[in-house]
Amino acid sequence: MEPTLQQVFGAGATLSPTQLIIDLQNLAANGLNVSTPPKAEALLVALIIQARTTLTLENFEANIDQSIYTEDGFSTVASRGENAAIYKIEPIIFNLAKLNAPTILDPNAY
């Protein structure tokens, strides 16, 4: 069985013909501060953290209907900006699996 909308996007996530609705309060469990309107990047990180709870390699290997799994990359550091401030880079890899066919990346295939 494919992962559910709630497993990937959090409890309370719903889908209409035109909208994906995600309950921000449920993303607070992933560290998102919902007391003020969150920034776009903070929302994305909270969604990634949520998705990682279900889209694991272990679940992928046990469930033939799961097409995506996440894994950690290797952390690095980089200097950025005029002051060369040191930033920690934490890569998260999303692996997209489908039957082998010569096509372009199509979100509908997953």
Image: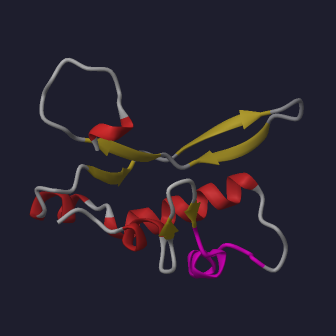
**Which is more toward the observer, 92 or 55?**
55
The residue under the point 35% across, 27% down is 105
Q: Is residue 20 placed above or below 68 in the rendered structure? A: below
Q: Quadrant of residue 28?
A: bottom right
Give the residue at the far top of this rendering. 102
Horizontal and vertical percent position of residue 81: 83, 32
The residue under the point 32% across, 61% down is 55
Q: Is residue 28 left or right of residue 109?
A: right
State which quarter of the image contains the N terminus.
bottom left
Horizontal and vertical percent position of residue 63: 13, 62
Q: Is residue 18 left or right of residue 56?
A: right
Q: Quadrant of residue 44?
A: bottom right
Q: Is residue 40 placed above or below 26 in the rendered structure? A: above
Give the residue at the far right of this rendering. 82
State which quarter of the image contains the C terminus.
top left
**Which is more toward the observer, 13 or 47?**
13
Horizontal and vertical percent position of residue 14: 50, 70
The residue under the point 54% across, 62% down is 47
Give the residue at the far front of this rendering. 17
**Which is more toward the observer, 75 or 100?**
100
Horizontal and vertical percent position of residue 2: 23, 62
Query: How is this picture coloured?
Result: secondary structure
Total marks placed: 0
Bounds of the magenta span?
22-34
Q: Is residue 71 placed above or below 31 in the rendered structure? A: above
The residue under the point 42% across, 73% down is 6
